[in-house]
């Protein structure tokens, strides 16, 4: 699995999505992240087909949404996503949120899809430690990925340590906190030192912190810019400075407080 990719949340305009995915792949992106809930799987599938790239060279992630969860419903949801994407298999299939009373059965459906070869890897999103422990105590396969909100102001160190201990990769959604970290003085200072944008500093910090990151952009300049983070390294002291920025501040829901009855 690539450690860097393109997020596509809120890319709902078909041409915008198609163009963004093709631009990203043109400039070296190989991981494309989508979800049933994003309602853009069909456009992403079209872009992949039109790119002319070999299927095995592209890593496609999608997710089962809350209203689709449960064993039988998840199997059906997977098939809908696969058909919309127009591909024979999905590289990584994730549970989008830990819906109470359903996520264990949903995980069992993911295990079946994995064992059948329909997906190459399975994982979860927005799972706290107690959700992961629940999965691990009631299943045969440990999630390979936990995609969570992660950025300098929300680093979730206990969750990160737990996942590392159990060989679960953390993948960051909202890795740039939707731009809210760009004005931070530490990030601004590093930006000036390395002649990089605040986004590039933040993404480089995440990569060095062993986080898979999927910044979202449909702007070609930013897509290229975001990926240009492999020609410098933050020092150990600078990594500590970034670690000290943690505020436990979210832009999205805490998984234990998500309005599951409404979405």
Image (tube, rainbow, N blue to C red):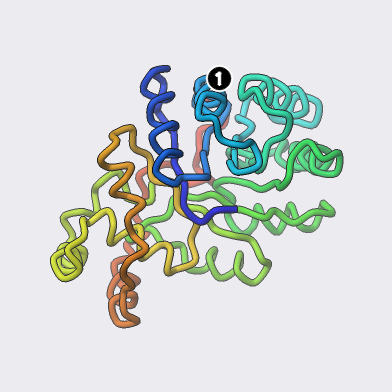
Mark yes or no: residue 153 visible.
no
Q: In this rendering, is residue 74 above or below 96?
A: above
Left or right of 75? Residue 146 is: left
Residue pictured at 25% horizontal, 40% vertical: 221
Tell me how many marks there are.
Answer: 1
Left or right of 209? Residue 89 is: right
Residue pictured at 32% horizontal, 50% vertical: 226
Mark yes or no: residue 21 visible.
yes
Quadrant in which residue 191 is drawn: bottom left
Q: Residue 93: image x %, image y %?
A: 66, 40
Quadrant in which residue 67 is drawn: top right
Q: Which residue is mark 1?
A: 42
Q: In this rendering, is residue 14 above or below 156?
A: above
Q: Residue 9: image x %, image y %?
A: 43, 33
Q: In front here: 261 or 209?
A: 209
Q: Residue 18: image x %, image y %?
A: 43, 24
Q: In front here: 108 or 121?
A: 121
Tag 1 secondary structure: helix
């Amino acid at each position: 699995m690539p450690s860097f990719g393109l997020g596509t949340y809120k890319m709902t305009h078909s041409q915008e999505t198609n163009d963004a995915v093709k631009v990203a792949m043109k400039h070296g992106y190989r991981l494309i992240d989508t979800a049933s809930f994003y309602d853009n799987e069909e456009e992403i599938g079209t872009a992949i087909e039109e790119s002319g790239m070999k299927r095995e060279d592209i890593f496609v992630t999608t997710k089962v949404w809350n209203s689709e969860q449960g064993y039988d419903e998840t199997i059906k949801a997977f098939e809908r996503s696969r058909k919309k994407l127009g591909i024979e298999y999905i590289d990584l299939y994730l549970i989008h949120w830990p819906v109470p009373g359903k996520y264990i059965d949903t995980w069992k459906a993911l295990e079946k899809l994995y064992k059948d070869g329909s997906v190459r890897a399975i994982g979860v999103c927005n799972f706290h430690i107690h959700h992961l422990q629940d999965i691990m105590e009631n299943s045969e396969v440990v999630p390979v990925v936990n995609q969570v909100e992660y950025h300098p102001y929300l680093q979730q160190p206990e969750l990160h340590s737990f996942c590392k201990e159990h060989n679960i990769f953390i993948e960051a959604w909202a890795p740039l906190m939707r731009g809210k970290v760009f004005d931070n003085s530490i990030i601004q200072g590093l930006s000036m030192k390395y002649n990089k944008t605040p986004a590039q500093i933040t993404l480089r910090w995440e990569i060095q912190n062993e986080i898979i990151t999927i910044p979202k952009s449909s702007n070609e300049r930013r897509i290229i810019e975001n990926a240009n983070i492999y020609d410098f390294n933050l020092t150990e002291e600078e990594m500590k400075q970034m670690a000290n920025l943690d505020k436990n501040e979210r832009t999205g829901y805490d998984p234990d407080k998500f309005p599951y009855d409404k979405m």
